[in-house]
Image (spheres, rainbow, N blue to C red):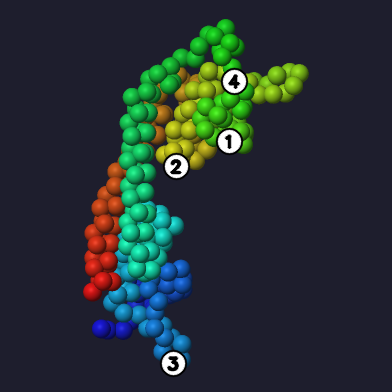
């Protein structure tokens, strides 16, 4: 088996030799042998490991890709497969969430109720947080970002969320699941408020759909790379 230097592995992927060493230290590559003077000796197996790890990142992200590679190097294939299964389950959940949003979008962004109805159906910050299964701190962060505009009780200063606020909070929750930044969510909701249009939301959902499709394709590429690398480790 031929021997390779860190620079050989780095050159193929246009990364630094320090990055290669960092990946090894993190367990994303198998441990390298050392020369008597302490230099690392890499092999074709390390080159394949690096290709595999970098292929996993678009599919699963850096952290999960690292978990998968470390599990393989610990000879714990079941652990690696369980991590992969969870990621696929999350992708399916995201797809189902997106489909549900598309079906419900006309209802969610419908014209807000009359002032009489709104005042009769306000919620406290605790009630809205419980409804969305988020923390009150999250709702305050959304308010600071301009996503929510609750009214304040003039005496107590407590926040009161109207049905319109509930609509905006539900949209924010949905778009956060699509990894949208708060400033982008605020822009989408601002357009809906001012224009009463779903065009901005539809654009955001289309973008989310493209991201999910890209991730699904990346998972197919990752599966092929993992299959080859797992076979190399067992040979």
**Which type of secondary structure does the marked residue at label 1 adopt?**
loop
Quarter of the picture holding the C terminus: bottom left
Mark 3, Cα crowd under 10 Å, few <14 / some 14-19 / many 20+, is few
Q: Which residue is mark 4?
A: 123
Front position in the image: 234 or 105: 234
In this view, the residue in front, 73 or 26, is 73
Decide: marks 4, 1 in contact (CB < 8 A)? no
For marks 1 and 3, give the CA distance: 56 Å
Residue found 50% across the figure and 11% down from its top: 113
In the drawing, does residue 117 fall left or right of residue 206?
right
Residue of label 2? 179
Q: Nearer the viewer, mark 3 or mark 2?
A: 3
Query: Could you tell me residue 114's position as x and y percent?
Result: 53, 8
Residue ID for mark 1 = 135
Q: Quadrant of residue 33?
A: bottom left
Q: Residue furthest right?
A: 155
Element class at badge 2: loop
Residue 125 seen from this side: yes
Q: Quadrant of the N terminus?
A: bottom left
What residue is rendered at 60% in x and 12% in y?
119
Q: Could you tell which of marks 1 and 3 lies nearer the N-terminus?
A: 3
Comparing marks 2 and 4, which lies closer to the viewer? Answer: 4
Q: CA distance from mark 3 to mark 2?
A: 48 Å
> Which residue position is annotated with label 3?
36
Q: Is residue 231 left or right of residue 91?
A: left
- Which comes before the other along the chain, label 4 or label 1? 4
């Amino acid at each position: 088996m031929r021997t390779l230097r860190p620079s050989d592995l780095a050159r193929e992927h246009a990364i630094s030799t320090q990055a290669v060493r960092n990946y090894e230290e993190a367990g994303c590559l198998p441990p390298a042998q050392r020369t008597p003077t302490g230099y690392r000796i890499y092999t074709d197996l390390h080159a394949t490991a690096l290709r595999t790890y970098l292929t996993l990142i678009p599919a699963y992200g850096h952290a999960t890709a690292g978990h998968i590679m470390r599990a393989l190097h610990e000879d714990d294939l079941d652990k690696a497969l369980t991590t992969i299964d969870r990621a696929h389950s999350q992708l399916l959940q995201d797809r189902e969430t997106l489909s549900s949003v598309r079906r419900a979008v006309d209802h969610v962004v419908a014209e807000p109720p009359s002032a009489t109805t709104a005042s009769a159906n306000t919620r406290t910050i605790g009630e809205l947080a419980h409804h969305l299964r988020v923390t009150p701190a999250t709702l305050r962060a959304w308010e600071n970002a301009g996503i929510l505009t609750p009214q304040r009780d003039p005496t107590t200063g407590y926040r009161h969320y109207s049905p319109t606020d509930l609509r905006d909070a539900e949209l924010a929750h949905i778009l956060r699941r699509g990894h949208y930044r708060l400033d982008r969510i605020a822009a989408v909701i601002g357009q809906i408020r001012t224009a009463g249009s779903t065009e901005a939301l539809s654009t955001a959902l289309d973008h989310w759909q493209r991201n999910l499709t890209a991730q699904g394709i990346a998972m197919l590429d990752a599966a092929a790379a993992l299959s080859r690398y797992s076979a190399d480790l067992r040979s």
